[in-house]
Image: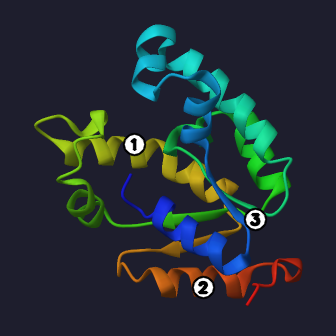
Amino acid sequence: MGAGKTTVGRQLAAALGYSFIDSDHEIEARTGADIPWIFQVEGEDGFRRRESQVIDDLTRRSRIVLATGGGAVLRPENRAALHGRGFVVYLSADIDQLLARTARDRNRPLLRTDNPRAVFERILAEREPLYREVAHLVVNTNAGNVREAVGAIVSCLPRPHAPTM
């Protein structure tokens, strides 16, 4: 949350001439329900099953930039599909930056708490090793310069992904 997946992902897709897909939006489109409703009715396990199906499908496509929800790495099959079928970029940022970027966002139920810092600390303690395990490249987005982040990613992509001009 707040690392820049959507912003950087959209600009990277544009630079490469690819389509941008957000896996959470894809789940909502396929089910006709929003993520909070799926969590409420099916629980986290039901949501994660749907997420794994979508990731399996989307990672079989070519010429896309895929942004996943932060919890996608919790399932080994997702990590295998992402790492094995694509070039994975982990956008990292310090907790202070993540807090600043998400402070006014009311669409983040996990952060509706008296201590959002503790939420980020717990999530990162659990997930950061998994993010690093699956990533081919780590890009720090603390500076917030989207153009630089996209440039860093493009310069590290394997050659078949040359940007379109």
Badge 1 or badge 2: first in the primary sequence: 1
Residue lying farthest to the left in this orientation = 114
Separation of residues labelled 3 and 2 (CA atoms):
13 Å
Which residue is under mark 2?
152
At label 1, counting other C-alpha atoms closer than 10 Å, the crowd grade (few under 14, some 14-19, many 20 or more) is few
Label 1 with label 3: CB-CB less than 8 Å: no
Query: Eyeballing the image, is 27 above or below 25?
Result: above
The secondary element bearing badge 2 is classed as: helix
Residue 1 shown left or right of residue 15 in the figure? left
Query: Eyeballing the image, is 107 above or below 164?
Result: above
Residue 91 shown left or right of residue 89 in the figure? left
Kindly identify the amino acid type of the residue bearing the numbered disc 1.
Ile
Kindly identify the amino acid type of the residue bearing the numbered disc 2.
Ala
Badge 1 or badge 3: first in the primary sequence: 3
Which residue is under mark 1?
123
Which residue is found at the position 72% from the left and 77% from the top?
A: 16
Which residue is found at the position 52% from the left and 81% from the top?
A: 149
Residue lying farthest to the top in this orientation = 41
